[in-house]
Image (cartoon, rainbow, N blue to C red):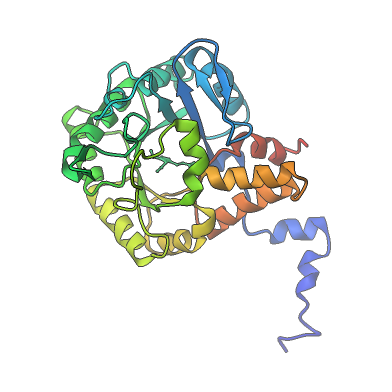
């Protein structure tokens, strides 16, 4: 006799203690990596208007942020840079003293064991805002690979633990692997933004990073939100090219993609809970339309349940506090 009234699924929901052992997915601060925006100047901690609770911080104020991250038990940080100037070829992305490279040094001097991941892309550094070099109005894939490789090498040399290419250029993982190996950086892992969609949910980030494309859009290199089989191809290719971890981005509207990648790939799977997903919750909470704590933890739990091992999230600090019982 399998059915009702003998079987009652509510039995496993009857009390806190029973619900606790029946719980399949458990979130912890260890699941999170916190993205940070670093900028030039002194004593700056500029609020990002589109992302309440997030700031662009100058290097002298970076330690305050890092101290909190470490104290909360968050697994690491992902660095994005706001350069002092932009040009056609994104020079500051691969400058030996670039803003991200310097930020890595600041962190590693005081916290050698904190995981530091660096975003490898040109869009924050180019005056046209595209993720690669533009030739004849097009983003030139192959010409961009060398610059991405140089970006990754300078970041790894500065002490980054993991480099994370997000430009969606074909062959970027292979090119970066080759360049790192040639520089004696063969032990630096690559976290590949493998399935990265052309998403409206990056909107708040582009204000934060000043990286909106000045003409056209990113659909010529980022994926069509309608596709999931293509995401599997992207992931397979990145694995073949030498990726050590693979990422699906965004996360919340792509839980099916996360689950399908999880089924097929044994590498660690990272999901990026992007700026728009964050700011939606923040805006609704501010209006009193959502319970912020519950909504945030539900979103993060769902991403983990779908199959993510690691979640890149702007909610990391507050979620870590809530998970240890703070209000
Ligand atoms: C590209 C990059 C983007 C994000 C991370 N890396 C923006 C884009 O592709 O336009 C978006 C992250 C977010 O929205 O939180 N360097």
Q: Nearer the viewer, residue 150 or 113?
A: 150
| Furthest-bottom residue in this view | 1
Residue drawn at (65%, 40%), measured in percent from left and top?
Answer: 319
- The answer to whether 190 appears left or right of 133 in the picture is right
- The answer to whether 45 appears left or right of 93 in the picture is right
Residue 182 position in % (x across, y down):
16, 31
- The answer to whether 62 appears left or right of 298 in the picture is left
Residue 286 position in % (x across, y down):
73, 41
Residue drawn at (75%, 38%), measured in percent from left and top?
Answer: 325
Q: Quadrant of the C terminus?
A: top right
Q: Is residue 151 visible?
A: yes
Q: Nearer the viewer, residue 212 or 45?
A: 212
Residue drawn at (48%, 50%), measured in percent from left and top?
Answer: 200
Where does ligand 1 appear, by image quarter? Answer: top left
Q: Is residue 309 visible?
A: no
- The answer to whether 206 appears left or right of 156 in the picture is right
Q: Quadrant of residue 61?
A: top right
Q: Quadrant of the N terminus?
A: bottom right
Q: Quadrant of residue 6?
A: bottom right
Residue 107 position in % (x across, y down):
46, 19
Total numbered badges shown on the rendered structure:
0
Q: Nearer the viewer, residue 321 or 22?
A: 321
Q: Is 148 placed above or below 290 here?
A: above
């Amino acid at each position: 006799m399998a059915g009702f009234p003998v079987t009652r699924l509510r039995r496993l929901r009857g009390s806190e203690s029973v619900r606790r052992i029946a719980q399949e997915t458990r979130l912890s601060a260890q699941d999170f990596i916190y993205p940070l925006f670093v900028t030039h100047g002194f004593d700056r901690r500029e609020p990002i208007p589109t992302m309440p609770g997030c700031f662009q911080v100058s290097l002298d104020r970076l330690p305050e942020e890092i101290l909190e991250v470490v104290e909360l038990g968050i697994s690491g940080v992902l660095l994005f840079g706001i350069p002092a100037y932009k040009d056609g070829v994104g020079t500051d992305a691969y400058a030996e003293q670039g803003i991200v490279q310097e930020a890595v040094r600041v962190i590693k001097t005081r916290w050698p064991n904190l995981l530091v991941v660096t975003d490898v892309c040109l869009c924050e550094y180019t005056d046209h805002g595209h993720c690669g070099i533009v030739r004849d109005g097009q983003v030139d894939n192959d010409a961009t690979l060398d610059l991405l490789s140089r970006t990754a090498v300078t970041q790894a040399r500065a002490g980054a633990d993991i480099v994370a290419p997000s430009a969606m250029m074909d062959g970027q993982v292979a090119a970066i692997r080759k360049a790192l190996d040639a520089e004696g950086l063969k032990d630096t892992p690559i976290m590949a933004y493998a399935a990265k969609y052309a998403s409206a949910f990056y909107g708040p980030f582009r204000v934060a990073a000043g990286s909106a494309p000045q003409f056209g859009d990113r659909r010529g290199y980022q994926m069509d939100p309608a596709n999931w089989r293509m995401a599997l191809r992207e992931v397979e290719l990145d694995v073949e090219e030498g990726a050590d971890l693979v990422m699906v981005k965004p996360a919340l509207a792509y839980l099916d993609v996360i689950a399908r990648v999880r089924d097929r790939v044994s590498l660690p799977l990272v999901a990026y809970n992007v700026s728009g997903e964050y700011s939606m919750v923040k805006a609704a909470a501010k209006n009193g339309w959502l319970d912020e704590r519950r909504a945030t933890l539900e979103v993060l739990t769902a991403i983990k349940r779908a199959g993510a091992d690691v979640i890149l999230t702007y909610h990391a600090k507050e979620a870590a506090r809530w998970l240890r019982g703070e209000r």
